[in-house]
Image (cartoon, helix red, strand yellow):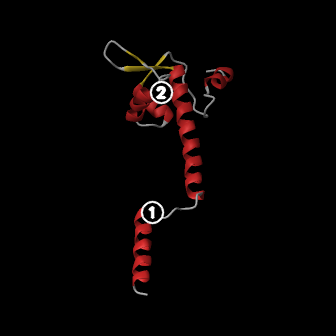
Amino acid sequence: MSPRTRANAKSTATDVLIPEKLYFRIGEVSRLCDLPAYVLRFWETEFPQLKPVKSSTGQRMYRRKDVESVLRINQHYHDSAETEITTIFSRPTAPSPASSNVLVAKRRAQGAGR
């Protein structure tokens, strides 16, 4: 593969080298994207742009644009997960309803003893 073709073979979402092929089986996409096959099958139901064709034997055949979509979805997932985790841990914690009930019961007990 020439350096120019190799540069064109890289995905814009990450630095994954996508081979120059027409179709990829689910196992190949799984290895390329470092995702379990069940995640790919689930994402097919969640993302309408991810539509691999099926071969005559029922094997999922992903096109290059499908692989690029998987890489973009995965990158977005990781970016947003980090943002959500940071947001969750930066929020002040509100008391849980159970602890609020305990405080109310303590206050009532203190008021009754006066």
Q: 3 or 57: which is nearer to us?
A: 57
| Residue 9's disc number | none
Q: Quadrant of the N terminus?
A: top right
Which of the 4 image quarters holds residue 98? bottom left
Amino acid at dot 1: Ser
Image spot of residue 22 (x, y percent): 50, 15
Q: 4 or 63: which is nearer to us?
A: 63
Q: Do the residues labelled 1 and 2 touch (CB within 8 Å)?
A: no
Which residue is identified by label 1? 96
Q: Is residue 12 shown left or right of residue 96? A: right
Q: 110 or 26: which is nearer to us?
A: 110
Q: Badge 1: how crowded within 10 Å, few (<14), some, or many (20+)?
A: few
**Element marked by disc 2:** loop
Single out the residue that lies furthest toward the left: 57
Which residue is identified by label 2? 47
Image spot of residue 47 (x, y percent): 47, 27
Q: How far apart are marks 1 and 2 (CA)?
A: 35 Å
Nearer the viewer's eye, disc 1 or disc 2? 1
Q: In which quarter of the image is the C terminus?
A: bottom left
Residue at screen point 45% across, 37% down: 35
**Element marked by disc 1:** loop
Tell me which numbered mark, 1 or 2, is placed earlier along the sequence.
2
Q: 84 or 111: which is nearer to us?
A: 111
Residue at screen point 51% across, 29% down: 70
Image spot of residue 13 (x, y percent): 61, 32
Q: Examine the rendered structure and indicate whether residue 76 appears above or below residue 93.
A: above
Q: Badge 2: how crowded within 10 Å, few (<14), some, or many (20+)?
A: few
Image spot of residue 43 (x, y percent): 44, 31
Q: Examine the rendered structure and indicate whether residue 33 appears above or below residue 96.
A: above
Q: Is residue 12 shown left or right of residue 38? A: right
Q: Is residue 84 shown left or right of residue 114? A: right
Amino acid at dot 2: Phe
